[in-house]
Amino acid sequence: MKKIVWSQDLSVGVAEIDEQHRQWIQRLNDVAAAMAANLGPVQTAKTLAFLIDYTKLHFATEEKLMTERGYPGLPAQRAQHKELTATLQDLLRDFEEEGATQKLAETINTFLGNWLLKHIREEDLKFGAFLKAQPA
Ligand SMILES: [Fe+2]
Ligand SMILES: [Fe+2]
């Protein structure tokens, strides 16, 4: 698959969030690479579990910051975060039950990357703009 790369146009303007987005992309690429290289169930499940853990950490960081800043878009963010977390848990369960199927590989390669890029562009950047408009 085509590796996803973080680029400046994805910058939310908060160093911690940008760094987490970079890490998230790295972990997603690790999952895709593990599946592509047929690293085997244990190793691949491990990369997926790392991705899930990191996703939770990242969403918690964002939601905490949004709460602190009184961001009005928090409910929409929370809903999307919750949905993706559930999707990831389903993916891990599917993987544990069925192994690295074509469908799973496609979901990981296209859906997750697209979801992230769309979410950053449409939701996280809005939060960045909100913060910039606010006195620190
Ligand atoms: Fe984010
Ligand atoms: Fe977010």
Image (cartoon, grey):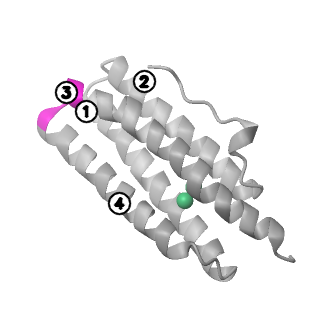
Q: Which mark is residue 83?
A: 4
User: Between marks 4 and 3, how big is the CA–CA gap?
Assistant: 22 Å
User: Between marks 2 and 3, how big is the CA–CA gap?
Assistant: 14 Å
Where residue 54 sits: x, y (%)? 49, 53
The answer as to whether callout 1 falls within 8 Å of ligand 1 is no
Indicate the quadrant where residue 105 lies.
top left
> Which residues are drawn in magenta?
98-103
**Residue 29, relative to residue 69: is it above or below?**
above
List the residue tagged with mark 3.
Answer: 101
Residue drawn where x is 81% and y is 66% of the image: 132
List the residue tagged with mark 1.
Answer: 104
The amino acid marked with disc number 3 is Thr
Nearest to the eye among marks 1 and 4: give it: 4
For mark 2, does the 10 Å Cα neighbourhood hold few (<14), some (14 to 19), or many (20 or more) residues?
some
Q: Earlier in the sequence, mark 1 or mark 2?
A: 2
User: Between marks 1 and 3, how big is the CA–CA gap?
Assistant: 5 Å
